[in-house]
Amino acid sequence: MKKKVVSILTAVTLCAAMLAGCGGGADDAATTETTETNETADAADSTEETADAAEQPAADLSGTITAAGSSALKPLADDAADAFAELYPDVAITIDAGGSGEGLKQVSEGTVDIGNSDVPAEDKLEADQAAELVDHQVCVITMAPIVNPDVAEAGVTSLTKDQLISIFTGETTNWSEVGGPDEDIVLVTRPTSSGTRATFQQYALDGNEEASNASMETDDSGVLLQNVKDTKGAIGYVALSYLTGDPGVATVAIDGVEPTLENTYNGTYPVWTYEHMYTKGEPNEVVNAFLQYIMSSDYGPRMEELGYGVSANMTVTEH
């Protein structure tokens, strides 16, 4: 009888041990699976964080950026540089004008980091030089004809494209010929190196060659604006970015369409182009961070305040 009791107890003990072993194996497997899943998730999170970090410039970003070129783009570049400097005070940015042709020449030669231009590089450089540059289209710019206030006050607030062509090619020389005062038309012109001139000639003058007035020729938009403001009978053209606030001149509609951002966005106003910031090859980290900042959605509203168009808001992308 004692032997039977011992045998039964032994069997029970063995079963219990086996059951414990089986249960422990299932728990261990579950634990291992959970651990591996968590490790995979952590690895994925780490990868995403690394990718996010790669998209953002380092907080301690430092270095220098030099740019030159389009005077039409300079107000935007200056404003963006000031805002960027608040985020990255160890980055020094110097921006000069000089005209699109000069900016493209300098970036091609490697004397500046960025060449600002109203026109594609191939319009101003040899094909092999242009091929070395990387185009960053940062915004849309609208060019507006402007006149001295006395011309507008006498009734010239809109011109047909044919009238505009006749004036800027030198065929029409008195405002009375287009419904204005009996006074000479004074052209305030830009040099042939000017990207603003190239844009206006293409889209406002239908490619007709603009006459030059050497006595009042300048590629500095600020100087041009002041010359039109100070000279009775004067006419010229500048980007909308120079017409914010009270510029002291009057804009002229073309075929009844006012030069505004709204009319540029909806495709009814024809004199606009993309603004380019060219780099020779891919930009370095500091220059790239600046370019990405200018084109960011955060900076977009400020861009419009300055009179420039956000490319994403265009309903037409070609003329």
Image: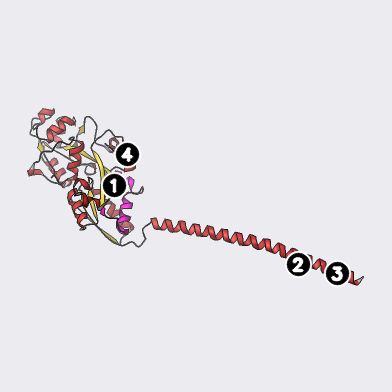
Q: Mark 4 = which residue?
A: 314
> Callout 3, which amino acid?
Ser
Extreme residue in the right direction: 1
Going from N to C along the chain, the mark reached first, 2 or 1, is: 2
- The front one of 133 and 218 is 133
Circle 3: element type: helix
Q: Give the CA distance from mark 4 to mark 2.
A: 76 Å
Q: Mark 2 = which residue?
A: 17
> In the image, residue 315 lies at what x, y percent?
33, 36
Circle 1: element type: strand
- Between label 4 and label 2, give the one nearer the viewer: 2
Going from N to C along the chain, the mark reached first, 4 or 2, is: 2
- Between label 1 and label 4, give the one nearer the viewer: 1
Task: Check whether the beta carbons of the residues at disc 1 and disc 3 lie within 8 A of each other.
Answer: no
Taking 114 as reference, is 87 left or right?
Answer: right
Q: Give the CA distance from mark 2 to mark 1.
A: 74 Å
Magenta segment boundaries in residue numbering: 279-305
